[in-house]
């Protein structure tokens, strides 16, 4: 699944944060953005040129990347963050993990960058939220009483249900409410205990 594909490259810790290592997965993913990209376009280039000039990321987004580089160096620890940017009118969502790599003298000399593309997952979750919202609206606006009783409590009730049985949302959520209590006294003898 390409949404789980990881892109990896290493950035040298100098004033320009130049790319010193790039793997094939990174090149394959970057070719989806620009099919003319190859390893020599990335290696030795500073991150500013790559992100601002090559991929047209907004300067304020590059400042976030740079800030995370500096924080990784300052704390000498791995840094995880989520990053969203626009590319070709599409919003791209990524999970980034920056890991400092140290010399024998315990000086941070590289930062490994691992990125997971979460764009597809983000789209699926948004579609799910929209679907849940439509479903919830349909239930709430129904003229029929609708409920979902699960194990020993009401998971879901709509307004018509509450009006029909003369309960508030809070009352129906109470563990003291028993489903059998809502049935007519004549029918209770037929219900299992």
Image (cartoon, grey):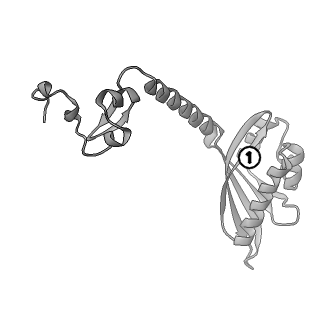
The image shows residue 92 at horizontal and vertical percentages of: 71, 40
The image shows residue 187 at horizontal and vertical percentages of: 14, 25
| Mark 1 surroundings within 10 Å by alpha-carbon count, few (fewer than 14), some (14 through 19), many (20 or more) | some
Q: Nearer the viewer, residue 140 or 45?
A: 140
Q: Considering only vertical position in the picture, is 101 above or below 29? A: below
Q: Residue at x 66, y 39 (%)?
A: 119
Give residue 174's quadrant in the image: top left
Q: Is residue 137 visible?
A: yes
Q: Residue at x 75, y 79 (%)?
A: 105
* Residue occupied by mark 1: 26
Q: Residue at x 35, y 28 (%)?
A: 163
Q: Nearer the viewer, residue 114 or 61?
A: 61
User: Looking at the rendering, in which quadrant would you find the N terminus?
Assistant: top right
User: Looking at the rendering, in which quadrant would you find the C terminus?
Assistant: top left
Q: Is residue 147 left or right of residue 109?
A: left
Give residue 37's quadrant in the image: top right
Question: Which SS class for mark 1?
Answer: helix
Q: Is residue 40 visible?
A: no
Q: Is residue 161 left or right of residue 63?
A: left
The image shows residue 91 at horizontal and vertical percentages of: 73, 38
């Amino acid at each position: 699944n390409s949404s789980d594909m990881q892109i990896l490259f290493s950035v040298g810790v100098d004033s320009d944060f130049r790319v010193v290592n790039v793997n094939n997965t990174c090149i394959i993913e970057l070719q989806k953005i620009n099919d003319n990209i190859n390893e020599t376009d990335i290696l030795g280039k500073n991150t500013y040129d790559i992100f601002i000039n090559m991929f047209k990321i907004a300067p304020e987004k590059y400042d976030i990347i740079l800030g995370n580089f500096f924080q990784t160096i300052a704390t000498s620890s791995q840094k995880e963050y989520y990053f969203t940017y626009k590319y070709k009118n599409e919003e791209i969502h990524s999970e980034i993990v920056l890991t400092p790599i140290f010399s024998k003298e315990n000086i941070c000399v590289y930062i490994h960058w691992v990125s997971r593309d979460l764009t597809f997952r983000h789209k699926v979750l948004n579609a799910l939220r929209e679907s849940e919202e439509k479903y919830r609206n349909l239930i709430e606006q129904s003229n029929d009483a609708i409920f979902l009783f699960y194990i020993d409590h009401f998971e879901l009730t709509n307004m018509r249900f509450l009006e029909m049985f003369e309960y508030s949302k809070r009352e129906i959520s109470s563990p003291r409410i028993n489903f059998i209590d809502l049935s007519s006294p004549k029918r209770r003898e037929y219900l299992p205990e």
